[in-house]
Amino acid sequence: MRLKWIATAVAFGCLAFQAPGVAVAQDKPSDKPTADQAKNNATDRQLMQKIRKAVMDDKSLSTSAHNVKIIAQDGKVTLKGPVKTEEEKTTVNKLATDIAGAGNVTDEITVTPAKTKKGS
C-alpha cells in the first residue's frame, strides 16, 4: 500500500512539473482576457452586471446568447462565446456598446448555428 502511494505521488509530481519556457497545450495567450482575469474593482463589476442584466432581459435571445462571457478590465469589455445567429451577435454587441460606450467593446463572439438532427 505504501509503495502504491509513493508511486502515485511521484507520477503526479511528474505531471505537475513544467520546465520554464516550455509551452503546454492548455496555455492561453496572455494578451487575450479571460473571465478569471476580470478586475475585481467596483466599476468593472457594475459594468459587467449592467451588461449581463441587459442581455438577460432580452427574451428574444437564445440560452447561448444569454451565456456569453462578459469580461471587463478598466472599463473595456470583451464578449466571448457562441451564439446561434448573426442577429444575436449583433444584439449582444449593441447592448454592451450602449452600456460601455463606443470603442469600449471587443466582440469575440462566434456564430455557431444549432445542429440539425439526422434524418430531418
Image (tube, rainbow, N blue to C red):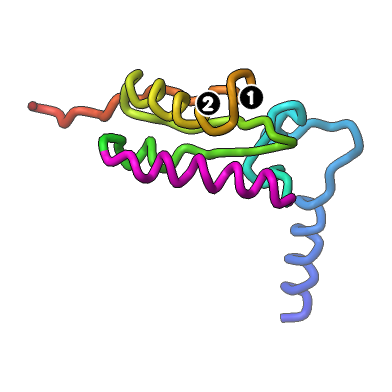
Residue 97's disc is: 2
**Percent position (x, y) of residue 82?**
42, 30
Closer to the camera in the image, 63 or 94: 94
Can you give x and y, in whole percent of width and height, for residue 67 in the image?
43, 42
Toward which corner of the image does residue 12 lie, by quadrant? bottom right
- Residue 37 in the magenta stretch? The answer is no
Q: Is residue 106 left or right of residue 12?
A: left
> Where's residue 33, x and y in %?
68, 33
Residue kind at label 1, given as amino acid type? Asn
Residue occupying the point 35% across, 26% down: 88
Q: Residue at x 48, y 44 (%)?
A: 52
Residue at 53 percent of width and 26 percent of height? 97
Query: Label 1: how many residues lie within 10 Å, few (<14), some (14-19) or many (20+)?
Result: some
The region drawn magenta spans 41-59
Q: Disc 1 on helix, strand or loop?
A: loop
Pick whichever, 120 or 24, lies toward us: 120
Query: In the drawing, does residue 108 fall left or right of residue 29?
Result: left
Amino acid marked by disc 2: Thr
Q: CA gap, disc 2 to disc 1? A: 7 Å
The answer to whether mark 2 and mark 1 are in CB contact below 8 A is yes
Quadrant of the image occupied by residue 83: top left
- Residue 66 locus on image (x, y percent): 39, 41
Q: Which residue lies furthest to the left in this view?
A: 120
The prevailing secondary structure element of the residues shown in magenta is helix
Q: What element carries label 2?
A: helix
The mark that comes first in sequence, 2 or 1, is 2
Q: Name the residue at the right extreme.
A: 20
Query: What's the mark number on residue 53?
Result: none
| Residue, disc 1 | 104
Name the residue nearer the viewer: 64 or 41. 41
